[in-house]
Image (cartoon, rainbow, N blue to C red):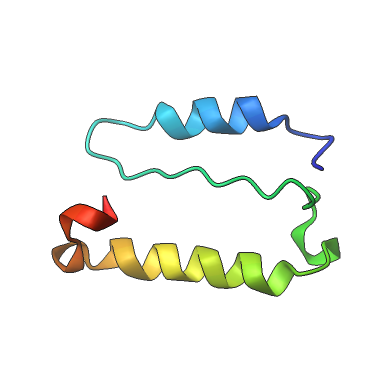
C-alpha cells in the first residue's frame, strides 16, 4: 500500500489528462510507493512496458484494446 499518495488522487490525475491524452489506471494494492521495494515489482514493470509499447504505436490498437 502506498501511504505517500492515496489511490484516489492518482486515479483523479489519470482522468485529468489533456484532451487526446491516453491515460490508464491500474492499482496494485500490495505495492508501495518505492516500487523496487515491492515483492513482484518485475510484473508491474512488465505491465508498464506493455502499456507503453501498445500506446507508442496507436495504429496497432483495436476496439478491444481501448
Provide residue 27's location: percent of width, then percent of height. 62, 45
**In the image: residue 66, left or right of residue 35:** left
Q: Residue 28 in the image: x percent, y percent?
A: 68, 50
Residue at 67%, 32% in the rendered image: 7
Locate residue 52, reporting x and y percent.
40, 64
Locate residue 35: give its quadrant: bottom right
Residue at 42% x, 29% y is 15
In this picture, residue 62 sits left or right of residue 66: left
The residue under the point 31% across, 31% down is 18
Give the number of marks. 0
Quarter holding residue 51: bottom left
Q: Residue furthest front?
A: 64
In the image, residue 64 sits, relative to residue 22, either above or below, namely: below
Q: Nearer the viewer, residue 66 or 2?
A: 66
Residue located at (50% from left, 42% from top)? 25
* Left or right: 25 in relation to 41: left
Looking at the rendered image, the quarter that the N terminus falls into is: top right
Amino acid at each position: 500500500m502506498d501511504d505517500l499518495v492515496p489511490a484516489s488522487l492518482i486515479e483523479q490525475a489519470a482522468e485529468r489528462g489533456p484532451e487526446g491524452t491516453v491515460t490508464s489506471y491500474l492499482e496494485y494494492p500490495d505495492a508501495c510507493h518505492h516500487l523496487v521495494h515491492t515483492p513482484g515489482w518485475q510484473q508491474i514493470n512488465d505491465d508498464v512496458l506493455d502499456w507503453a509499447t501498445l500506446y507508442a504505436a496507436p495504429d496497432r490498437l483495436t476496439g478491444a484494446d481501448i
